[in-house]
Image (spheres, helix red, strand yellow):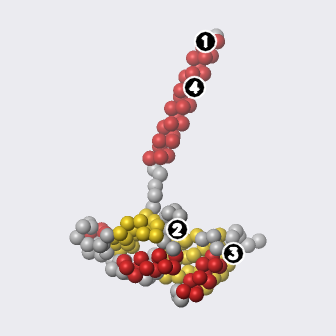
Amino acid sequence: MKRLATIILIALSTITTSYAQNNVQSQNQFQMKLNAGIITEKIQETKQFYTENLGFGVTFENEFYLLMHTPGHQAQLSFLLPDHPSQQPLFQSKFQGEGAYLTIEVQDVDELYHQLKEKGVQIKIDIRDEPWGDRHFAIQDPNGVGIDLVKYTGPAN
């Protein structure tokens, strides 16, 4: 009887371990890293805007592509010249300056607001508190992309 119980425990342990490994492999198979991209002729202006105003760094750059990262390397954003012969037609049409936005969560939205105002960056939406818990303001990059700079504060009572 003890031998049967031991065999059952070993079998259950093997099945459980196999299931857990398969489950982890399945989850890892679908882990993703997002890099949003904008097709634009304004790569140099964009680089200057993001580095000088938001502290982004350059991860990679060549004559037709710019890959940037947020401070701390938590997210990336890329820019590509339109109609570049190295790219497939899907990635050749330039962004038309409407219908896109980025949300960037920051620790001190008030400080960033004051810094950007001092630099003369045009504020598109003044700093405000929303009932759903955002304290935020918005600016616009050289390509027309709206940038919502936000600190989540929690919903108002």
Q: For the residues marked 3 and 2, what is the alpha-carbon distance in whole angstroms? A: 29 Å
Pointer 3 or 1: first along the chain? 1
The 10 Å Cα crowd at callout 3, few under 14, some 14 to 19, many 20 or more, is few
Pointer 1 or 2: first along the chain? 1
Residue at position x 62%, y 16% in the image:
5
Pointer 4 or 2: first along the chain? 4
The 10 Å Cα crowd at callout 1, few under 14, some 14 to 19, many 20 or more, is few
Residue at position x 56%, y 83% in the image:
116
- Nearest to the observer: residue 132 or residue 38: 38
Q: Is residue 7 above or below residue 83?
A: above
Q: For the residues marked 1 and 2, what is the alpha-carbon distance in whole angstroms? A: 59 Å
Q: Residue flagged by tag 1: what amino acid is it?
A: Arg
Q: Residue flagged by tag 2: what amino acid is it?
A: Pro
Q: Is residue 106 above or below residue 140?
A: above
Numbered badge on residue 12: 4
Residue farthest along the left direction in this orientation: 85
Where is residue 44? Give x, y as percent.
Answer: 37, 79
Quadrant in which residue 154 is drawn? bottom right
Residue at position x 46%, y 70% in the image:
57
Report which residue position mark 2 lands on. Answer: 71
Report which residue position mark 3 lands on. Answer: 131
Do the CB atoms of the residues marked 3 and 1 lie less than 8 Å apart? Answer: no
Q: Residue flagged by tag 3: what amino acid is it?
A: Pro
